[in-house]
Image (tube, rainbow, N blue to C red):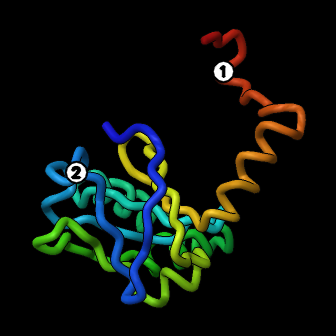
Amino acid sequence: MFRGTTNLSMDVKGRLAVPAKHREALLAKVVLTAHPHGCLLLYPQPAWEPIEAKMMALSSFDKQSSGLQRLLVGYAEDIELDSAGRLLVSPTLREFAKLEKEVMLVGQGSHFEMWNMEAWRKQLDSVMGGGGIEMPAELEGFSL
């Protein structure tokens, strides 16, 4: 289970050090891909495989489905952590998410999101400042 946020520094080669508390869960191959919100998604490969299978089962003739396939599967890259616990983000994915030196790693349970720091702050501002989050119907009556 991946929780919490961590501010990471990307080096000039595009490497990020994975926090020590998450390295063991990510020691095998991981998958890094693009998300429609402009961030990247980082999944352990076993968690990614059923998502990819669902995406590829959608019709390639449907514009929305094929667009998501191109984004999520088309950008997906298999990555292995190096001996120092770092992962290398490709130039293509860095460009997509506008990742620079400061990167925010955000736990989302089964995976992480990786955000450009400015984009992350805008994301938080839209949630906190714009009257909050509109709750989906399936969460009506939900309370913390």
- The disc placed on residue 20 is 2
Residue 50 picture location, percent across and down:
31, 54
SS under mark 1: helix
Task: Choose between 5 and 112: the one closer to the eye.
Answer: 5
The residue at 79%/37% (across/down) is 128
Residue 58 picture location, percent across and down:
50, 64
Of all residues, the one furthest to the right in this rendering is 131
The residue at 71%/46% (across/down) is 124
The 10 Å Cα crowd at callout 2, few under 14, some 14 to 19, many 20 or more, is few
Q: Give the amino acid type for the residue marked by disc 2 in the picture.
A: Ala
| CA distance separating discs 2 and 1 | 34 Å
Give the image quarter of residue 37. bottom right
Q: Earlier in the sequence, mark 2 or mark 1?
A: 2
- The disc placed on residue 15 is none
Task: Choose between 70 and 6: the one closer to the eye.
Answer: 6
Residue 6 picture location, percent across and down:
44, 50
Q: Give the amino acid type for the residue marked by disc 1 in the picture.
A: Leu
Task: Check contact, mark 2 vs mark 1: CB within 8 A.
Answer: no
Residue 98 picture location, percent across and down:
61, 78
Image quadrant occupied by the N terminus: top left
Give the image quarter of residue 9. bottom left
The residue at 25%/75% (across/down) is 79
* Closer mark to the observer between disc 2 and disc 1: 2
Q: Is residue 40 left or right of residue 109?
A: right
SS under mark 2: helix
Disc 1 designates what residue?
139
The 10 Å Cα crowd at callout 1, few under 14, some 14 to 19, many 20 or more, is few
